Image (cartoon, grey):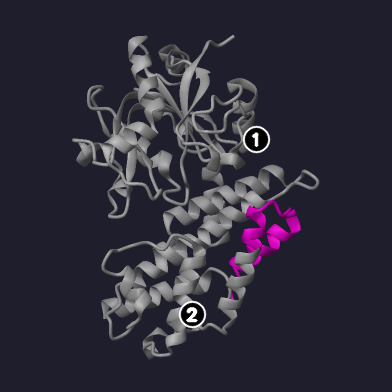
C-alpha cells in the first residue's frame, strides 16, 4: 500500500486560463539544465481583503507550516492541482508569499500572471508536473477513495469528504493525505515511460489526454468555416465538451451539464477576450459610452458572460455606431435576434450550473445553435463582429 503523507490540494479556474497546465509545462520544457528547470505556479486571489504579507501569512499559515514540516523531513511537497476534471501532481521545492512577483519572474512565470489586475497570494516553485488523471469521475474517485477525508483547514469544524461543489467552504490550498513525492515522481517509472524525458512534464500525456488532439483535429474539419478564426482557449473548451459527449453518449440518462458549460466558456471567451477586447480599442467618437470608458484605461476584463452581455446591450442601445460596424450593431441590438438567443443560452447555462439535468439531445441541440452557419445566432456573429472591428481599427 502506498504511504500517505500530508500534501496540498488546490483548485485552478479554467475561466482564467484554460491552458493552465500547458503554459506551465511549456516553461518547464524550455529550461535545459536541472538547476534552471522550474516554473512558478501562482495561487490567484480574487477576494476583497488587503494583500499585505502579514494578512497572507495568517490566512495560509497551514501551507507555510506544511512546507516547513516537509523540509524538516527532507522531502519535497506535492501540490495536487485540479479544475475538477483533470488532476495533476506538482513537485514543489519552495513556497513564497505574494503579492509581489518572484525575483526571476521574467523567465519562470507564465504571462497571464502579469496582467494588470492579477493578484497572486502564494507562489509555488514547481520542478516537475505529472498527470494523475484527465477524467472527472476518476478525479473525484481519487480523492474520495484514495486520499480519504479532507483535513479541514478552514472553519467547518469537522472532517468532510472531498466535495468539489462545496469548494467555496475551503481556503485553498487545503491539506490532504496523498502519496509521497518519491512515489509520484519515481525516476525508475519515468525511465520506463521514456528514455529521453528529463521529467514527467516532458511526457506527451502530461498536458492533455491522448484522445483530445484527435478531437481537435476532427473539430477543425467539422467547423472548417470558423475554426481558424477561434481563439486557442475556445478550441480547448470545445474539445473538452466533445470529449465528454463521446465518452458518455452511450450511457442512458447521463447529465451533459459539464459539456454544455464548456461550450458556454467558449462563447464567453470569444465575447470577452475576442470581441470586447477589440471594442475597448475603438476611439471615443465611435463608442462614447460610460461603460466602455470605465474598462478602457485600466484594461480591465469583464468577469462573466452576464457583464459582457450588459456592455454589448448598452453599446447597441446607443444607436450611433458607424455604418462600417453593421455586424456589430446587429449583434448588440437589444431587441435583435442574437441578443434574444444569448438570453436563452445564458439561462440554460445557469440551469446547467445549478444541477438542471441536460440530456444528450438537448446538449446536441445547443451545439447546433452555437455553430449555426447561416443564421444570425450563435458564435459565428460574434467572430464576424470581431473581424469587422479589427478591420475598422486597421483602416
Q: Is residue 259 magenta?
A: no
Please name the residue shown 41% across and 42% down the image.
20
Query: What is the residue that sits farthest to the right in this orientation?
Result: 252
Please identify the quarter of the rendering in which residue 63 is found: top left
Q: For mark 1, does the 10 Å Cα neighbourhood hold few (<14), some (14 to 19), or many (20 or more) residues?
A: few
Which residue is painted at 42% across and 39% down in the image? 21
Element type at marker 2? Answer: helix
Q: Mark 2 — residue? A: 332
Q: Quadrant of residue 211?
A: top right
For the C terminus, give its image quadrant.
bottom left
Drawn side of residue 17 relative to residue 93, left or right? right
Q: Which residues are magenta?
A: 348-375
Q: Is 264 placed above or below 8 here?
A: below
Asked whether residue 328 appears in the rendered view, the answer is no
- Which sits in the foreground, 34 or 273? 273
How far across and how far down the image is residue 357, in percent?
A: 74, 53
Does residue 2 lie above or below 271 as drawn? above
* Quadrant hosting residue 238: bottom right
Residue at screen point 73% across, 47% down:
249
Residue at the image position 41 percent from the left and 63 percent from the top = 302
Give the numbered dot on residue 137: 1
In the image, residue 130 sits, relative to residue 118, either above or below, namely above
Amino acid at each position: 500500500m502506498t504511504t500517505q503523507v500530508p500534501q496540498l490540494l488546490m483548485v485552478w479556474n479554467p475561466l482564467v486560463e484554460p491552458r493552465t497546465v500547458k503554459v506551465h509545462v511549456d516553461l518547464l520544457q524550455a529550461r535545459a539544465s536541472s538547476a534552471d528547470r522550474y516554473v512558478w505556479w501562482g495561487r490567484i486571489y480574487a477576494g476583497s481583503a488587503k494583500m499585505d504579507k502579514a494578512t497572507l501569512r495568517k490566512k495560509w499559515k497551514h501551507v507555510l507550516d506544511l512546507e516547513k514540516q516537509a523540509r524538516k523531513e527532507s522531502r519535497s511537497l506535492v501540490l495536487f492541482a485540479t479544475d475538477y476534471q483533470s488532476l495533476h501532481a506538482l513537485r514543489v521545492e519552495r513556497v513564497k508569499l505574494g503579492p509581489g512577483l518572484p525575483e526571476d519572474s521574467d523567465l519562470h512565470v507564465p504571462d497571464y500572471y502579469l496582467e494588470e489586475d492579477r493578484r497572486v497570494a502564494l507562489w509555488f516553485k514547481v520542478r516537475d508536473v505529472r498527470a494523475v488523471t484527465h477524467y472527472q469521475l476518476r478525479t473525484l474517485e481519487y480523492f474520495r477513495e484514495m486520499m480519504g477525508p479532507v483535513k479541514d483547514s478552514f472553519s467547518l469544524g469537522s472532517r468532510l469528504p472531498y466535495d468539489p461543489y462545496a469548494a467555496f467552504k475551503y481556503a485553498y490550498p487545503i491539506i490532504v493525505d496523498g502519496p509521497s513525492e518519491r512515489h509520484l515522481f519515481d525516476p525508475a517509472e519515468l525511465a520506463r515511460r521514456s528514455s529521453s524525458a528529463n521529467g514527467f512534464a516532458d511526457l506527451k500525456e502530461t498536458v492533455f489526454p491522448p484522445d483530445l488532439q484527435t478531437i481537435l483535429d476532427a473539430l477543425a474539419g467539422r467547423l472548417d468555416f470558423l475554426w481558424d478564426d477561434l481563439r486557442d482557449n475556445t478550441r480547448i473548451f470545445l474539445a473538452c465538451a466533445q470529449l465528454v459527449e463521446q465518452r458518455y453518449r452511450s450511457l442512458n440518462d447521463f447529465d451533459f451539464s459539464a459539456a454544455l458549460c464548456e461550450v458556454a466558456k467558449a462563447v464567453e471567451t470569444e465575447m470577452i477576450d475576442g470581441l470586447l477586447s477589440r471594442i475597448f480599442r475603438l476611439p471615443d467618437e465611435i463608442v462614447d459610452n460610460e461603460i466602455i470608458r470605465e474598462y478602457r484605461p485600466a484594461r480591465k476584463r469583464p468577469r462573466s458572460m452576464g457583464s459582457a452581455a450588459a456592455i454589448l446591450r448598452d453599446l447597441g442601445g446607443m444607436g450611433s455606431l458607424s455604418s462600417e460596424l453593421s455586424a456589430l450593431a446587429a449583434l448588440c441590438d437589444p431587441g435583435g435576434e442574437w441578443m434574444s438567443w444569448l438570453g436563452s443560452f445564458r439561462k440554460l447555462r445557469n440551469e446547467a450550473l445549478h444541477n438542471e439535468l441536460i440530456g444528450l439531445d438537448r446538449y446536441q441541440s445547443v451545439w447546433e445553435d452555437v455553430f449555426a452557419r447561416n443564421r444570425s445566432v450563435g458564435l459565428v456573429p460574434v467572430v464576424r463582429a470581431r473581424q469587422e472591428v479589427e478591420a475598422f481599427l486597421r483602416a
